[in-house]
Image: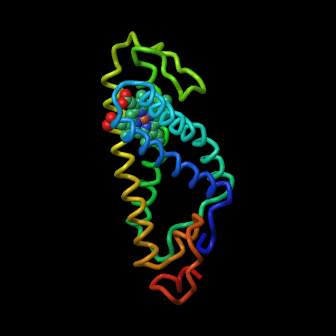
């Protein structure tokens, strides 16, 4: 419905998960800087904890979406744009599931049990499958896919905010609500 926002739980979960994904990605890049040793183990473990947080928050996020309602298509959006937005959101949700799961498999196929930054240990019960290399490659591929999907998502939000000047960014708690009549699409949004 135009003029409607996402629910507070949806907004809080969106930004919490966005931060967790960003820091998990940064952690993976930082881990690459270190050679094998306790620092790398700690950074990779922290990276995995952030990724597991994304996995744990996914179901609450979907429940918040189903129970809290979803604002309708952007005001004045053509059908292709609505379809593209749906497909991009579906892809992001699929990646929020598949990426942490592939990370979990990577951790559990290692030569030794996986240290979660000193807080817990994941068993390497899948080490005997010989799939470590494959699942790690899948994990990297999905991480790159996530990066591309997020880039598209951010570009779309910027386009809505600065070209269409509609209330799409505001719906997810970003910035003030555009004033009706100031932008090309706000007349329809009011
Ligand atoms: C949003 C979630 C996640 C993101 C964005 C992410 C991203 C990445 C990236 C970019 C890499 C580096 C790949 C490379 O070397 O080029 C990586 C590696 C790795 N990730 Fe994740 N990951 C996530 C979740 C997880 C989870 C949940 C786990 C485990 C429970 C995990 C375990 C690992 C492991 C073990 C590696 C290999 C580290 C190494 O040996 O250098 N990841 N991840």
Q: Is residue 98 visible?
A: no
Quadrant of residue 58 within the rendered picture: top right
Q: Position of residue 155 (x, y in %)?
A: 38, 64
- In depth, the one of 174 and 35 nearer the eye is 35
Residue at the bottom extreme?
A: 181
Q: Quadrant of ligand 1?
A: top left
Q: In the shown orientation, is residue 116 left or right of residue 9?
A: left
The correct choice, above or below, for 151 with respect to 110 in the image is below
Residue 32 as seen in the image, left or right of residue 62: left
Q: Position of residue 164 (x, y in %)?
A: 43, 78
Q: Residue at x 37, y 41 (%)?
A: 29
Residue for point 47% across, 77% down: 76
What residue appears at the point 34 percent right and 18 percent down from the top-left corner?
Answer: 131
- Residue 132 in sight from this viewpoint: yes
From this view, report whether residue 122 is shown above or below residue 9: above
Quadrant in the rendering for residue 60 = top right
Residue located at (33% from left, 29% from top): 35
Name the foreground residue: 7 vs 75: 7
When the figure is inspected, residue 9 is found, relative to residue 174, above or below; the finding is: above
Q: In the rendering, at what x and y percent does residue 73 appear?
A: 51, 67
* Colour scheme employed for the rendering of this structure: rainbow
Q: Quadrant of the N terminus?
A: bottom right
| Location of the C terminus (image quadrant) | bottom right
Position of 66 with respect to 151 (left or right) is: right
Q: Report the label total.
A: 0
Q: Residue furthest top?
A: 128
Residue 109: percent from left, percent from top: 41, 18
């Amino acid at each position: 419905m135009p003029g409607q926002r996402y629910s507070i739980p949806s907004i809080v979960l969106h930004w919490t998960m966005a931060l967790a994904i960003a820091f998990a990605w940064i952690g993976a890049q930082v881990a690459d800087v270190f050679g094998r040793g306790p620092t790398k183990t700690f950074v990779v473990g922290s990276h995995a904890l952030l990724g597991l947080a994304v996995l744990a928050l996914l179901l609450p996020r979907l429940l918040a979406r189903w129970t809290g309602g979803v604002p309708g298509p952007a005001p004045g959006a053509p059908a292709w744009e609505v379809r593209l937005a749906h497909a991009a959101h579906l892809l992001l949700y699929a990646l929020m599931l598949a990426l942490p799961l592939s990370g979990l498999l990577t951790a559990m196929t290692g030569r030794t049990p996986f240290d979660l930054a000193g807080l817990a240990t994941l068993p390497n019960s899948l080490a005997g499958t010989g799939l470590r290399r494959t699942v790690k490659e899948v994990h990297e591929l999905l991480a790159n896919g996530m990066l591309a999907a997020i880039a598209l998502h951010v570009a779309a939000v910027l386009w809505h905010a600065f070209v269409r000047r509609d209330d799409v960014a505001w719906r997810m708690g970003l910035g003030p609500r555009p004033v009706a009549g100031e932008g090309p699409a706000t007349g329809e949004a009011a």
